[in-house]
Structure formats: structure tokens, C-alpha cells
Image (cartoon, grey):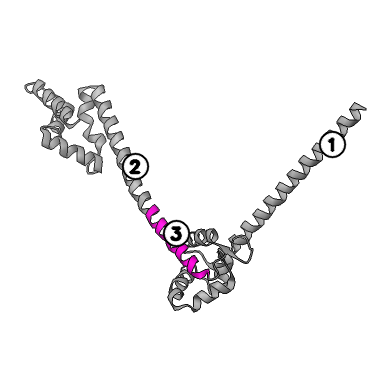
Amino acid sequence: YALYLEDISLAYLKETYNNEFDQSSKDTITNLKENWNGMGRTVRSLVFCITGGKEWADMSQPFWIMGTGNGISFMLFMSLMVIGLLNILIGVFVGEADTKRQGRDEESSRLFDILDTDSDGLLSFDEISEGFQNKHLAADLELIEHRVGTETVTDLFNILDVDGSKSITKLEFTQGLAKLYGHACASADLLLEEQKILRKLNQLQQHVNQLEDALVTLDYHAGGHHTSKSSE
């Protein structure tokens, strides 16, 4: 595309070499000579446009003068370049975030396996408490406490115990720690209140499901009873 821009710029400069121009046309010629006259300047100008070093709307002005098609082609090229650059940057950031998340999940899974001393796939309050007494684990657990602002082992346990079953599954543990790292600025009280709300919403959902099942059963029996009477 740089070669194409260079060619049309040189062709336009040659065609208008000896012509008389008004001030607007002179500005166009000056723009072409300074920014698009030669491959080196053309590549430099494209880099400036793509990276934001110069306003590409201003840099494209000569091409609109030379023809609407040239202006549109430049606009489409820049749009594709900007969108492509954004996609690359987003991909880099998302990839880095996924790598960090995967590393945290693996570390959380490893910590869970160490804390699960009876290997039943569940963490009890006693196992969490014993973990704080283990010099090899105390630093990791205290760091978690510090990040979320919990003052006691009980607070930390209640935050991770999503379903309130008095035990923590590996999924609850890994997802809970990921959530805690994402809410590092939130207080323990706020996280506990959020946990209570989620539990109440889950209970409400269960009641709604039970009510729907009861209504379906009632409707079924009512329909069957009505059919029996009709047959008689």
C-alpha cells in the first residue's frame, strides 16, 4: 500500500509541476512533498498515522483532493490497521491475564491439596486452622488474609464456604481465591455480606424450582382427573 501511495503522489506532483494553484492547492502540494514524496517518507508517514504520531485525517487530505476513491482507500486502510493493532494489543493483555490466572489456579489447587490432610476433597475449619500453624503454609494463608482484610480464620473460612455447608470444595477454594484476588480492595465484611446475599438468592431459586415442580405435578393430576371424568 505504501508503494501505491508513493506512485499516485509522484504522478500527481508531475502532472501539476508547472501549474498555477490557489492557496488550498499549494497546501496539498506541500503536504505531498513533505509526507508522501518517495518511499522513505511514505513509510514514515504511514507509521506516524498508525501509531498516532500524526493525525491521519490531516495526512489523508491530499488523497481526497486527488480523487474520492483514493481518500476512501486510505480511510479503509487506516481503519483496518487501527482495528488490527487494537486486536493485537487486546490479545497480548488477555493472554497475559489468562497466564496469570492459570498460575494462580494451579497454586490454589496445590495449596488445597496440602491443606486437605485427610484427602477427602473437602476442607474443614480445623484443616484451615491447622494450616495457619504450619510454618510452610502460614505465609501463604496470611498473605490471603492480608489481601482481603480478614482478621480471623473464621472470616476467611466463611468467605470461601460459598454454599454454607461448613466445608470447602476444591472448586470453591480455587474460585474463591480468584474472586478474593479480584476484590483485593474490598473489606471482609463486604465480602461476607455478598456471600449471604448469594446464599439467599440460591435458596430463593431452589424454592422457585420446587414451586414450579409442584405446579407441574398439580396440573398433571388435574388434567388426568378431568380426562377420567370425561371418559365416564
Q: Which residue lies at the image location 50% right of the left edge and 76% below the top edge? A: 132
> Which quadrant: the N terminus?
top left
What residue did someone put label 2 on?
A: 87
SS type, badge 3: helix
Dot label at residue 123: none
The one nearer the camera, 92 or 217, is 217
Magenta span:
97-116
Dot label at residue 222: 1
Of labels 1 and 2, earlier in sequence is 2
Q: Which residue lies at the image location 26% right of the left edge and 27% below the top edge? A: 73
Residue sitting at the far front = 119
Alpha carbon distance from label 2 to label 3: 26 Å
The one nearer the camera, 58 or 85, is 85
The one nearer the camera, 27 or 72, is 72
Residue type at numbered disc 2: Asn
Q: Which residue lies at the image location 45% right of the left edge and 64% below the top edge? A: 110
Crowding near pointer 2: few (<14 within 10 Å), some, many (20+)? few
Of labels 2 and 3, earlier in sequence is 2
What residue did someone put label 3 on?
A: 105
Residue type at numbered disc 1: Ala
